Each structure stands twice: as C-alpha cells, then as structure tokens.
Image (cartoon, grey):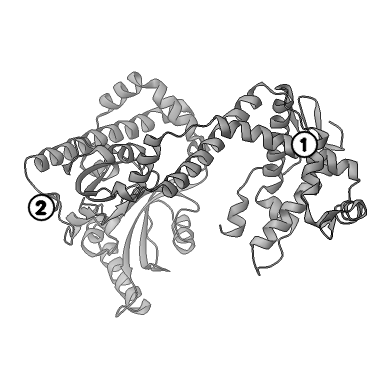
Amino acid sequence: MSRDNVATVNGKEITRIQFERAYARQLADIQRRSGNREPITREMADQYGMGSQLLDQLINTELLYQAAESEGMRISDDEVAEEINKVEAFKVNGVFSQENYRSIVEGQLGMQTWQFEDQLRRDLLLQKKIGAVRNAVRVSDDEVQAEFIREKEVYALTLVRFPFGAQKSAISAPTLEDIDAYAKANAGEVSKFYEDNKGRYNQSKQVRARHILIKTGGAMTVEQATAKIQELKDRIVKGEDFAEVAKAESEDPGSKVKGGDLGKFGEGVMVPEFQAAAFALKAGEISDPVVSKFGVHLIKVEEVFEPKIITLEEATRDIARELLIASLAKAKTKELAEDTLAQVKGGKKLSELWPADPGEGEEAVGKPRSEETGDFRLLGTFIPRIGTSEEIANDLPTMALGPAEKVYETNDEKLVVLVLDKHDKPDLALLTDSVKDGIRDRLTAQRTETELENFIKALKEKAKIVKDPTISAPGNIQAMLGL
C-alpha cells in the first residue's frame, strides 16, 4: 500500500490527507466536549484508539458509498446546487454570492470549490442511501403500543440469588477415580479450558499460604494489632496448629473458616506488603507481623511453586477436578434454588426461607438472602439487583403476580428465584398521537441503525479491505472523556 493512503476498499483509496482532515475535525470535537479539561493531544487520543475507530468509520462510509453507486443511486448537479444555496454563510443580503462561496471554501475549508462540490455530492448520496434504509423500516401501531407499555409499566420483585461458587465448599473432595473418569468423558472441555486459560499454566512463581488477620481501625491501633499477631505467632511456634489458631482468632471472614487458607496465588494478587512477605518465605516458614491497609497479618507459606510451563497432560487432572467440582456445585445450587421455588409456590415467602439479614458468624458468610428491587421500569435488559438478563426482561411483561414459573440463570454464574410483587400498566389513554409519533421515530431510528450495521457487516464480508497496520489499535475514545 502507498504511504499516501491509509486504506483501500475494493481498490478505492482512502488517502492519508482524508484521514488527517477527519482526525483533526474529530479531535477538535472531542476537545469541545471535554469542556475545560487539559488539552487532549494526539498521543492521548491514539492511546484510546481514536485512529483505528476513525479509519473504520471512513471504511464504512466508503462501503456505503460504493453500495449506493452500485444500486444506481445518483446526485444531480441541481441537487448539489440546491444544497449549496441553502447555506446562509454563502449569501449576501439573502442572495447566493459566488465570491463569498469561493472565499469561504478556499480560505476557511482549505479546498477548491470543485473538491467541496465532489464531497458534498458524496455526502448527499450517503444521506440518500441511509434514507432508503430508513424508509424501508416499518414500525406497526402494535409495536408502538407495546413500546409505550414497556417504557411506562412499573415492576417490583423480591428475589434470592444463589451463586454457584458458594456451594463449592459443601462439595466433598472427589476421588482420583472420579476425576480421571470425568477427564476421560470430557476431554474436549478440559482441552478448551486449558487453551482459554493458557496464562494460568505458563506460571511465574506462586505460593500457597495461610494467614491470620487482625483488623486495624477504631479502637484497634496498628501497634495493638501487631502485638496481638506476635502473641499468636508465639503460640504457634510453641506448638499450636496455625489453621486452628486462624479459625479461632482471624478476623478475615473469607478465610478463617478454612483455617486461614488463601489457596495458591502469584504476583499481583495480594497487596504489595503481603506479597513481599509471602514470597520471601520458604515452605513451612511463618512471617513476622505484616502491616497492610487491611490490618496486621501473620503469614505461613505451605508450598512454593517455582516458575514453570505446565503442559495439558500435566494440567489435566487439576482441570478435571476444578470442572467436576464446579459441575457438582452448579447441580447442588440448582437443587437448592428449585427447592426454594417449590416452597414459594407452596405458600412460603422468600423472606421467611432466606431472611434479608442472614445474621452473623461463619454460617452467615455467603449465605443467600432475600432482596427487594423496589419499583422500577424496564430499561433494556437491566434488572435491579440482578444486572442484565435478556431472559427475565423478556418474561416480565407476561409474568403473573407471584412466584416465577422457573429458576433463572444470570450472566454472572448465579441462579435466581424471584417473585413478582407488582406490575402496574399505564393508562393507554395517555398514548396520544404525538406520543405515538415520538415512539415511532425513536424505534425507526434504532432499527435504521441496526439495519445499517448489519448491511455494512455484510458488505465487509464480501469486500477486499486493506488497512495501514500502523494506525492505532482499537480502544474506547469515550473512556478518555469519562462519557
């Protein structure tokens, strides 16, 4: 590809000059949108992938333009002249001025008038193509009414979430025979897990450790917590079991029930002070008191794993164990959720089965609890307390008051049992003609955008596109603005 171009689309060149002009306009627009912040440099914009996004926009535009031409769409000279005559800046006392026109185009836009007219002709052709797509979109009266109801109806739910992971601790350790049988029966799944988590098996140094935490803050000073940790260390050095002391004394609810066991971890997982102390220990050694933002820790390293690359063959048993436990936990969670739903259908309340306040102590950690969403309107597929769920969002409009018919699985590996407490529908008398027109216009715009995206995607699949590989990688320019 020539250095003068940034891409070719079916042999048609997108020049570097076109790209730089578009880049300058977009950067100026972003700067305006950023308000009074520091100036946004090209380096900053490239860091967020603006160049790549802009190039994709230019390619999409060229594809649409080529499609319009191939369909026989044309823009006449009269249409170009009519559009130019609409521009007030080109007029003097309300009359088009050739001198004003040439002065503005050449002086302010940096283009010859023929170049401006060619670009205008191109823009009008694109508008005509987009208009043709829009005109093909149909939104029925029933769809308008359904959207009005969807936007205005109010729901309220009571629900309980059951995370799959919460049941893992209740699963008995599988035997080697069970693990090997699972690995043999699910070889493809094991292999896929290995490929999807390759970084996990190209290991830097790791350790398996336990800890005891005494939290600081309030009445407990760092000095007091350090003295307490030293006292616990002395007890352990004299012969008490670290795990038992952790169960009795640690203030980390997540690990104390497991005797302070944190499992295996590598660099970057723990806070720096904790990591430095843990990685300095040999297997079996116990640290001095370690101060972090969480409090004061006592650390015991159980095993040290030196850097290594683990093959699929070596990893198979560990992967199979993990997948088997996850499968069993999921089955147990499903059983628990379905039993809950059955009891609710039998007349029990979710709040009775799973109180909103699960209490205190070890048993309360991770225990499911009932939650109320309060009143909400359905915006897209977002459900309060649950997150996005297309399945629940699709079912809610036709769901009867009371318990749902089934248990739902969410995107974040949870099962949800829910009760529909409220479903208030709007008064259709409020669906006036002007409201209908607004909804119809919005749905038409949304569908037009979707149709254009699908149309361009289909064009790209057939097109021959060559890009300059030096253009910055994709990113999210909105993130730079905090939008």
Per the image, the residue denoted by label 2 is 352
Given residues 412 and 244, the one toward you in this image is 412
Q: Which residue: 80% across, 32% down?
A: 76
Task: Tell me: 408 left or right of 483.
Answer: left
Residue at disc 2, secondary structure: helix
Earlier along the polypeptide chain: callout 2 or callout 1?
Answer: 1
Q: Quadrant of the C terminus?
A: bottom right
Q: Quadrant of residue 237?
A: bottom left
Task: Tell me: 434 left or right of 67.
Answer: left
Residue at disc 1, secondary structure: helix
Q: Residues within 10 Å of mark 1 (few under 14, many from 20)?
A: some
Residue 279 in the image: state x and y as whole percent. 47, 55
Residue 122 disc label: 1
Task: Tell me: 451 left or right of 173.
Answer: right
Given residues 24 and 424, the one toward you in this image is 424
Q: Quadrant of residue 131?
A: top right
Give how far apart the Cα atoms at labels 2 and 1 are: 67 Å
Name the residue at the top extreme: 185
Residue 443 in the image: state x and y as whole percent. 47, 40
Q: Which residue: 72% across, 55% down?
A: 27
Question: Can you say whether 189 is above or below 84 in the image?
Answer: above
Q: Which residue: 20% across, 62% down?
A: 248
